[in-house]
Image (cartoon, rainbow, N blue to C red):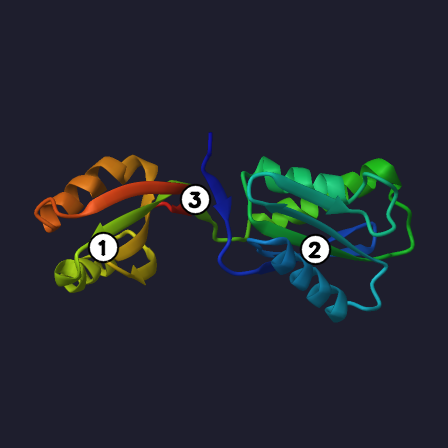
């Protein structure tokens, strides 16, 4: 069963320090592995002289990946993943850049340093809560399409796509909690002439 989660719309960066080592954490939205990889590559480009650029990303409420980038196994990527999960995030990527300060931290110290670098950065973020939703196909006759499209685009339900054939099909994102009310609204709007079909599971920003 799909569950709500938090995500970001913009990146956020914060620097911490542990025994003279600098830890620069940047967290950003990433809906695909490709977006995560691009952000990781950009952070590495910005910090070519860093001792380590450790990474973590969570995508699609299924994919969880951390990379220690040369730190002892399990001391960087894993605590970064756990920090993101612990705060309820998904569809995000985190990079923690370390500049070694000359003092070894030990395994426990590294776990704390990388985990806290992420959590302290998230403390400064402005998250969006994503809630379970459905992609709903609304099919109407051409003579109703103009009015229906105007009203859909003015509503709180994002229109993802419009297809033109024998009928006009609108793909609309509707939060699970609003499916019944949405179907009733469309029926009233079209005098019962529309066909409403629930399709794929997705997430949408929580309505305000």
Sort mark 2 into few (<14), some (14-19) or many (20+) by Cα contacts within 10 Å: many
| Above-or-below relation of 88 to 117 | above
Q: Residue at x 59, y 54 (%)?
A: 32
The image quarter in which residue 129 lies: top left
Q: Regarding mark 1 in the picture, which secondary structure is present there?
A: loop
Along the line of sight, the residue nearer the viewer: 196 or 133: 196
Instruction: Give coordinates of residue 171: x percent, y percent.
Output: 33, 53
Q: Which residue is drawn at 48% across and 50% down?
A: 127
Circles 1, 3 touching at the beta carbon (< 8 Å) = no
Q: Work out whether residue 161 can be spotted.
A: yes
Q: Which mark is residue 202?
A: 3
Instruction: Give coordinates of residue 113: x percent, y percent.
Output: 75, 45
For label 1, the residue is: 155
Instruction: Give coordinates of residue 130: x percent, y percent.
Output: 43, 44
Q: Regarding mark 3 in the picture, which secondary structure is present there?
A: strand
Spatial CA span between label 1 and label 3 = 18 Å
For label 2, the residue is: 95
Pointer 2 or 3: first along the chain: 2
Q: In this view, does 61 lie to the left or right of 150?
A: right
Q: Residue at x 25, y 49 (%)?
A: 138
Instruction: Give coordinates of residue 61: x percent, y percent.
Output: 56, 39
Along the line of sight, the residue nearer the viewer: 2 or 205: 2
Q: Residue at x 62, y 48 (%)?
A: 120
Q: Residue furthest top?
A: 1
Circles 2, 1 touching at the beta carbon (< 8 Å) = no
Spatial CA span between label 2 and label 1 = 37 Å
Along the line of sight, the residue nearer the viewer: 156 or 74: 156
């Amino acid at each position: 069963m799909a569950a709500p989660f938090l995500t970001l719309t913009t990146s956020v960066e914060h620097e911490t320090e542990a025994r003279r080592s600098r830890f620069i954490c940047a967290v950003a939205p990433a809906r695909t592995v490709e977006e995560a990889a691009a952000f990781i590559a950009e952070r590495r480009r910005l910090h070519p002289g860093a001792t380590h650029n450790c990474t973590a990303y969570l995508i699609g409420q299924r994919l969880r990946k951390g990379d220690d980038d040369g730190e002892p196994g399990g001391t960087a990527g894993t605590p970064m993943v756990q920090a993101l999960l612990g705060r309820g995030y998904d569809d995000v990527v985190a990079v923690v850049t370390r500049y070694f300060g000359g003092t070894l931290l030990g395994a426990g110290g590294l776990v704390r340093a990388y985990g806290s670098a992420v959590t302290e950065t998230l403390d400064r973020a402005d998250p969006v809560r994503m809630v379970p939703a459905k992609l709903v196909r609304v099919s109407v006759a051409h003579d109703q399409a103009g009015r229906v499209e105007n009203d859909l685009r003015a509503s709180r339900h994002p229109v993802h796509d419009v297809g033109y054939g024998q009928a006009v099909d609108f793909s609309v994102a509707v939060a699970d909690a609003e499916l019944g009310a949405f179907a009733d609204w469309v029926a009233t709007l079209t005098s019962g002439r529309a066909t409403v079909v629930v399709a794929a599971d997705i997430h949408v920003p929580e309505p305000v």
